[in-house]
Image (cartoon, rainbow, N blue to C red):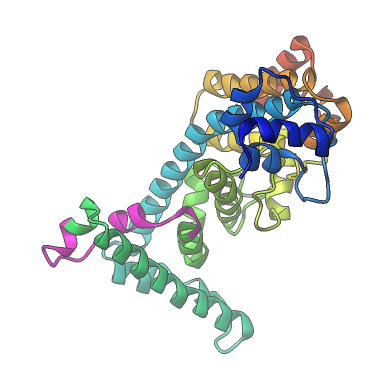
Amino acid sequence: MLSINQLMKYLRNHHQISVKSNQAQSLRNIGYYHGYKGYRFIRTPSQHIPFSSLDEIIALNKFDMQLKTLIYPKVMFIENALKSYVIEAVLQDSKSENLDVVFNKSITAYQSYAPGSQQYHKQYAKRMTLKGKINNALLRDYSNQKQIVNHFFDTDRPIPIWAVFESLTLGEFGTFFACANSNVKLKTSSILHLPSNLDSDGKITEYMIYAVKDLRNAVAHNNTIFDTRFQTSTINRRLISLLETEVGITGLDFKYIDAYIILITYILRKMGETKTVCKQFVTSFIDCTDLLRTQISPDVCNQILGTQQRTVTGFQLFRRSTKSASKFHQQFLKILA
């Protein structure tokens, strides 16, 4: 086990990283394993960042922390609102808040496939797995004395669907929505004001849930997010096409964090968030990226953030100048009005 001074010497001698004598506390604050080892590559360990100083590592760590601070309240808001919308859609479709009734009437996506077909079996198995996940989630919260679950179980009353949603993770909620019938999906799409020509089957919300889920979990657990290494699956192409069409962007790439900023802003506007709030969100992101570009090499920045050549109806999406950023704000929010 090395002391802080020994770690500083190790970074200098073995990694050729310049460490100032007064940076012991900074290294202690970010940690060698979480700070240096967690930030020395982009997306995969093979894509090594050629850091030359501890200052660069600290700057990237700070950038990542600023992103999490910026994004956390937005994804929490989105998660809560999406669950609320789906509850509304389910109650309208099933005419009941009883979980068993909801399952029998609304969690029936499997019925859209021919009985006995491969897709029928796949969807039915997903539905059965979902029921097990819900029971496990309720048992977990009951064992942990979660007030909402205990209130119903301790009085031997059926737990309503809205209370069930309080126990579901975002991933489990995504599975619930995926298993719902087309009535629930289309009603949710309508509440979100998604364009019917791009979401005729109501499945875009499902793709949004899964896209936000990985980011939300990474932020909540203080994992690294600056390079989108948190992705557990490919972002659905239909969601990307919708965003490109709606926002006027070409070549949207979720390999870069700015794609998530665009997705979050789009969802927030669809949920009725004000232009002012969305503009502040985007401005804060641009400020963070502008600062990072002054602290680490342009080549590394481009690997992390992209070459920043995507366009929004003629304006560069993210530029370093305040004037260009202002144009982006105006055009982006105009499109989402």
Looking at the rendering, in which quadrant would you find the N terminus?
Answer: top right
Q: Residue furthest right?
A: 299
Residue 242 appears in which quarter of the rendering?
A: top right
What is the x, y in percent for residue 295? 77, 20
Q: Residue furthest top?
A: 323
What is the x, y in percent for residue 294? 79, 17
Residue 16 appears in which quarter of the rendering?
A: top right
Q: Please, is residue 240 above or below residue 186 in the view?
A: above
Is residue 249 in sight in this rendering? Answer: no
Tell me the residue at 51%/35% (across/down): 72
Q: Is residue 30 left or right of residue 11?
A: left
Q: Is residue 15 left or right of residue 98?
A: right
Q: Give the magenta-colored segment's residue range.
A: 151-171
**Does the magenta run of residues contain 229?**
no
Tell me the residue at 72%/30% (across/down): 57
Q: Is residue 82 left or right of residue 195?
A: left
Q: Please, is residue 273 above or below residue 173 in the view?
A: above
Looking at the rendering, in which quadrant would you find the C terminus?
Answer: top right
Tell me the residue at 57%/89% (across/down): 116
Q: Please, is residue 231 above or below residue 259 in the view?
A: below
Q: Please, is residue 41 above or below residue 232 in the view?
A: above
Residue 325 appears in which quarter of the rendering?
A: top right
Tell me the residue at 86%/30% (across/down): 309
What is the x, y in percent for residue 157? 15, 65
Q: Between residues 281 and 305, which one lies in front from this camera angle?
A: 305
What is the x, y in percent for residue 182? 51, 63
